[in-house]
Image (cartoon, coloured by chain):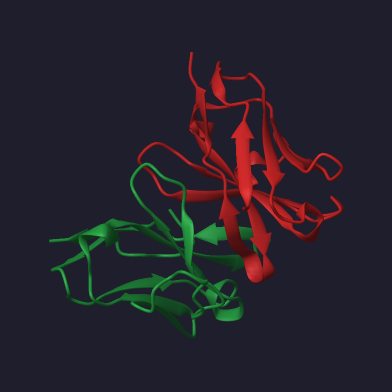
């Protein structure tokens, strides 16, 4: 059974940092691009970042470029999102997702809530 | 403002049919495949349709997808109260080099 389990969310002050993790199991992690997708309270889905199977290519939402860094550890079947200079607009549930062919978000975690507030 | 445009809400009676549109441009829907996701209240999204019109195993054939030019459509027949959810279209935007989603459509089964 495919499982994606996010962790690391919480309350942080504006300008602060947070590192999200996603533990993957039940599928061959190294075969997949991986994504972070977020959802602000009461709002729709917003793609945040993608990373290639070997970590050699990364893509980011314009509003997080220079502040967020996506990475992965294939030996540990884990995906990460380092978030710096957090802003109130970054408040959201953050989901990790495995990305199949043609940008299909095949499997999703349960999400972790990040709240940026003073 | 989402790159892909969906109606905010649709509604229909149980047993009826409903369609949800997703409008984009040549840099996204026009030259890439579209997928559709269902998000039940309080849960993570799940795949309903991929590659414009394919259903993953376990998704009933009441759900269908189509694409024409720069627009895509999700169809749901034989509506059930359990279909009440938010529905999102998604694809890749080749100009932005970014994933894009529609703003989501809330389906109410009256």
> Is residue B2 something that shows in the picture?
yes
Estimate the x, y position of residue A19 in percent, counting from the top left.
69, 27
**What residue is at 87 percent from the left and 42 percent from the top?**
A75
Q: Residue furthest top?
A: A118
> Is residue B103 something that shows in the picture?
no
Q: Note whether A97 is above or below B91 in the view shown.
A: above
Picture colour for chain A? red
Q: Which chain is green?
A: B
In the rendered structure, the answer to whether residue B44 lies left or right of residue B32 reads left
**Among the 4 quarters of the image, the one containing residue A4:** top right
Q: Note whether A107 is above or below B74 in the view shown.
A: above
Estimate the x, y position of residue B34 in percent, counting from the top left.
53, 73
Q: Note whether B12 is above or below A63 in the view shown.
A: below
Q: Residue furthest bottom?
A: B68
**What residue is at 51 percent from the left and 72 percent from the top?**
B57
Q: Note whether A84 is above or below B67 in the view shown.
A: above
Estimate the x, y position of residue B18 in percent, counting from the top left.
25, 74
């Amino acid at each position: 059974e495919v499982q994606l389990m996010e962790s690391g969310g919480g309350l942080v002050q504006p300008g602060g940092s947070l590192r999200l993790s996603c533990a993957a199991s039940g599928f061959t992690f190294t075969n997949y691009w991986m994504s972070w997708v977020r959802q602000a309270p009461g709002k729709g889905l917003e793609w945040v970042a993608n990373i290639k199977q070997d970590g050699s290519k990364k893509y980011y939402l314009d509003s997080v470029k220079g502040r967020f860094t996506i990475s992965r550890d294939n030996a540990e079947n884990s995906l990460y999102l380092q978030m710096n200079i957090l802003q109130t607009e970054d408040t959201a549930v953050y989901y990790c997702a495995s990305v199949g062919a043609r940008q299909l978000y095949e499997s999703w975690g349960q999400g972790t809530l990040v709240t940026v507030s003073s | 403002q989402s790159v892909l445009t969906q109606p905010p809400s649709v509604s229909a009676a149980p047993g009826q049919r409903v369609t949800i549109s997703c409008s984009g441009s040549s840099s996204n829907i026009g030259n890439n495949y579209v997928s559709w996701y269902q998000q039940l209240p309080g849960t993570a999204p799940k795949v309903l349709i991929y590659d414009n019109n394919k259903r993953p195993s376990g998704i009933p054939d009441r759900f269908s997808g189509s694409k024409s030019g720069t627009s895509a459509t999700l169809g749901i027949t034989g509506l059930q109260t359990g279909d009440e959810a938010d529905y999102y279209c998604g694809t890749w935007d080749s100009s932005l080099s970014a994933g894009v989603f529609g703003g989501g459509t809330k389906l109410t089964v009256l």
